Image: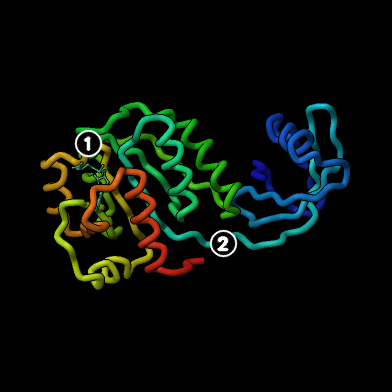
Amino acid sequence: LFVDADLTPGTVVEAAPNQAHYLLNVLRMRQDSELLVFNGRDGEWRARLAASGKKSASLTLIEQTRPQPVLPDLHYCFAPLKKGRLDYLVQKAVEMGASALTPVITQHCQMHKPGIERLRANALEAAEQCGILAVPPVHAPVKFDRLIADWDPGRRLIFCDESAETHNPLTMLQALETDRLGLIVGPEGGFSDAERRALHALPFVTAIPLGPRILRADTAAVAALAVIQATIGDWR
Ligand code: SAM
């Protein structure tokens, strides 16, 4: 469970109302039940349900059970999709190791104003569900040209390009010989020719095909993140 508090032995933290409901009515926790909490900075802690009311729950912190892991520095940039699939895409990206997420407004993207608070809630839910002990930030949407103009050239950008020539897998290994990575996946309507040309012209970009078929954007995102995670192995 995510708690927005410093984690030290004996500290008492109040669960948020929705969390109290989940603990008391869904998990049916009772006094002295134990659970694991994290705040995204201090690792994983064992906590005990110290007191509860009808709609409140206080947790007493006991001890750290896992140190804060060093997550891969993998910045995932995505053209926002329509609501339901966008929730899915954000949750899977967090599960698959994205350490930061940025919606990118491209020429053909379907959604120009994704609900950032909703995306952040999805990222938090996915982090709680898969126990990564961090909460990857979801940044405010940026326009494609601005993202590219402001990109740190020291960060390798993996560009999922269905029109990329098949490449030697070594290309991917060489591209991943860095500890600061980015990944960009286009919208359902694809990148425009100008966007694709702009990406191919950048020295820090590596275009990768993900097989001969056209994948849906959320499929491509999970596939690319899986290739990266599998190639790099466990960064923790
Ligand atoms: N241009 C596609 C078309 O002709 O239908 C539509 C784009 S596809 C639905 C969404 C995004 O997923 C693409 O912009 C690309 O980033 C990624 N993608 C899809 N299939 C891919 C593949 N085989 N290899 C690499 N990336 C792919």
Identified at 87% across, 47% down, the residue is: 32
* Residue 205 can be seen in this image: no
- The residue that mark 2 highlights is 69
Q: Quadrant of residue 195?
A: top left
| Marks 1 and 2, the one that precedes in the sequence | 2
Q: Is residue 40 left or right of residue 86?
A: right
Q: Amino acid at mark 1?
A: Gly
Residue at the (49%, 37%) spot, across then down: 120
Mark drawn on residue 189: 1
- The reply to whether residue 203 is visible in this rendering is yes
SS at badge 1: loop
Circles 1, 2 touching at the beta carbon (< 8 Å): no
Residue at 56% across, 61% down = 69
Q: Is mark 1 within 8 Å of ligand 1?
A: yes
Which residue is depicted at the point 25% across and 52% down? 160
Mark 2: which secondary structure? loop
Report the front residue among 18 and 74. Answer: 18
Which quadrant holds the N terminus? top right
